[in-house]
Image (cartoon, grey):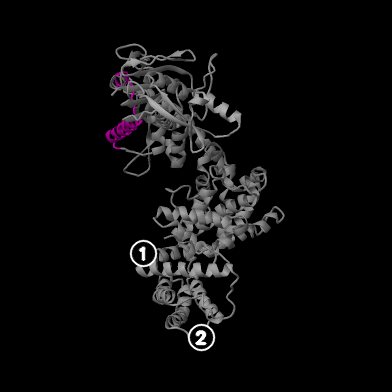
Amino acid sequence: MPQLLLELFSEEIPARMQAGAARDLERMAREHLAAAGFLPEALKTFAGPRRLTLVVEGLPIAQADRKEELKGPRVGAPPQAMEGFLRKAGLTQDQLVERDGVWMAFIEKTGRPTTEIVAEMVEAIIRGFPWPKSMTWGTSKLRWVRPLKRILCVFDREVVPFTIEGIEAGDVTEGHRFMRVGYGWGGQPFKVRDFDEYAKGLAEHFVVLDVEERKARILEGCKTLCFARNLELVEDIGLLEEVAGLAEWPTPVLGDMDPAFLDLPGEVIRTSMRTHQKYFAVRDPATGGLAPHFITIANVQSADGGTVIAAGNAKVLSSRLSDARFFWDEDVKVGFEPWLEKLNGVTFHAKLGTMAQRVERIVALAGEIAPLVGADVAKAKEAARLAKADLASQMVGEFPELQGLMGGYYARAAGLDPEIADAIRDHYKPQGPSDAVPTAPLSVAVALADKLDTLVGFFAIDEKPTGSKDPYALRRAALGVIRTILEGSLRVPLRAAFGAAYPGDPLNGRLQDLAEQLAEQLGLLNFFADRLKVTLKDQGKRHDLVDAVFAPINGKADDDLVRIVARVEALDGFLTTDDGKNLLAGYKRASNILKAEEKKGWKAEGGREILPDASAPEVQLHDALRMIEKPLASALEAEDFTAAMRELAGLRGPVDAFLDGVFVNSEVPAERDNRLKTLAAVRDAMGQVADFSLIGG
């Protein structure tokens, strides 16, 4: 079957946009081809520094003839509706057919040549491509991420003829910008007529088409260089992704740096290399520390093996590290107190005050949380007071990603308590699902205070995340709180923590009043419930069990995450047993009966009892409820939810016998009332563990 090859060749495409562009090209091509009735055998896209490529296998030469049914207006619809439909269908009214009171049009369309459809498709893709940022150039009105230079479009080894804004489609592409077969400068154009010729030609002209191949080439080259010098590569997936989008012929080059810079914090060296220069760091396996070398990814394979490139890059790196050393030396001289003063002039948020006011809130909250996590209150407050100070340092001003980390280094340089230094360093953790949570009590107290202050503050001013936007990373903050609490098995009631968020509110008490109502009224507790569902779902737990456990008991939802998870796990285990499944079914039957009667106005007033003529199932269930009452309460008091489930399992037989053998809606009012109270007692007993009505299945 014929093959379609499309290449959109332009100036350099930003590396961060390439993967998304490949996905968008594939999606748009699939949609256009499907709309034309094509189902290709295979479709693949490639993205690189200067080109987007699409190859589609198995397209027919021409579109098949088609019959289309168009549903029109109802018979008797206004004339305007009929006129509009006839224009759309290109028919007259006598050509329509009435079916079930609706006018239908049956249109036979002759299939068009695939080349025509491809030409239209490519133009639609180019004009509607969703680049995050695009530009125009020259006198053209066409928008593309960077100036579009060539369009290669070949179908079944023939050029698809079309022109877009003066760019004529052809069968010509070009190779590496600098490297050239034989001699001279690069950018050699060459003709291709299918994908095999295209891929082979690019390889011969020093272009690696597939990003995965470029990444493998970089990684292998880096490791080979390191092996030759008895070094280890400090692997960096994010940097690898980026440099693979910068070079068409990636060539790793090992360079040297001045060993004197190694007394700077390793993170500073790595950040200088990574952020500004896109260099990989290397490690000395003998010491485990950074080695005085780096690896840069050149876009050319030079005759001298990269000696000149390495020397040039070393000079640039030395300049960067000299700046870093200056920042470090100056910051160590200044210290924390002047930085804290500067925070008075830094606005955190227009409605939440300055950064200094935020620090005051975090200090107070850390003091409240410290006893709950086993931390020293005075140390927790001191660590919280200093945690944000490095935001005013020169180093963090240059490298914002080092905030917190540099604070820890500066605290050690100032001779502060190592525990306080660690808490400053770790208070942003965890910053993502792969980041470790803080474990030291002092670090936990400050980390929780920092995140809870953020969450409470932004919920208080109604800056909540929406479905697609979370500009203040509140979801990440909530997940960080959940992970820290659960992985540390910490007993931190969320409602109390929210309420304590603003004990010394510098904004004249306005937020403190709000904070105490946040849990329910502003939905912060539900927000945590949703985030906990995400966490537990990743662990294979059912989301409906989280809903059942989070539901209010005696009018109040549980807010102890450790206890909630323990209940979810016990409930999950219980419902996998026959007793659990059958008791859940019995609960739902009883609950449905009660709901129906409660809608009619029935209320449980007074206690249930054993009536003189009570049937055996009534007596049996009454006794079973009485028998589990104390053990169930004891198990719940001890938070032994597995034992609580075992006690509830004892109700299974009596509940089944009651529901199968007793007519609840007796004509004798006293009997009916007592039987309904018995069912309500079953619901209440089970409701002490979870709201079983929210459990599916």
Q: Nearer the viewer, residue 388 or 17?
A: 17
* Residue 216, disc: none
In the rendered structure, does residue 221 fall within the stretch colored magenta?
A: yes
Our reading of the magenta stretch's main secondary structure is helix
Q: Quadrant of the N terminus?
A: top left
Q: Is residue 604 above or below residue 489?
A: below
Callout 2: SS: loop
Look at the image and give the residue range highlighted in magenta: 201-230
Residue at 43% across, 80% down: 617
| Kind of residue at disc 2 | Leu
Q: Is residue 536 above or below residue 2?
A: below
Q: Position of residue 108 (x, y in %)?
A: 41, 25
Residue at 57% across, 75% down: 604
Q: Residues within 10 Å of mark 1 (few under 14, many from 20)?
A: few
Upstream in the sequence, badge 1 or badge 2?
1
Task: Work out how far the residue at label 1 is from the one at label 2, CA to CA, in angstroms.
Answer: 36 Å
Q: Nearer the viewer, residue 111 or 575?
A: 111
Q: Residues within 10 Å of mark 2 (few under 14, many from 20)?
A: few
> Which residue, given by chain and number where applicable, does mark 2 sit on?
611
Q: Quadrant of the C terminus?
A: bottom left
Callout 1: SS: loop
Q: Position of residue 511 (x, y in %)?
A: 67, 54
Q: Nearer the viewer, mark 1 or mark 2?
A: 2
Q: Position of residue 179 (x, y in %)?
A: 35, 17
Q: Nearer the viewer, residue 680 or 109?
A: 109
> Which residue, given by chain and number where applicable, does mark 1 sit on?
576
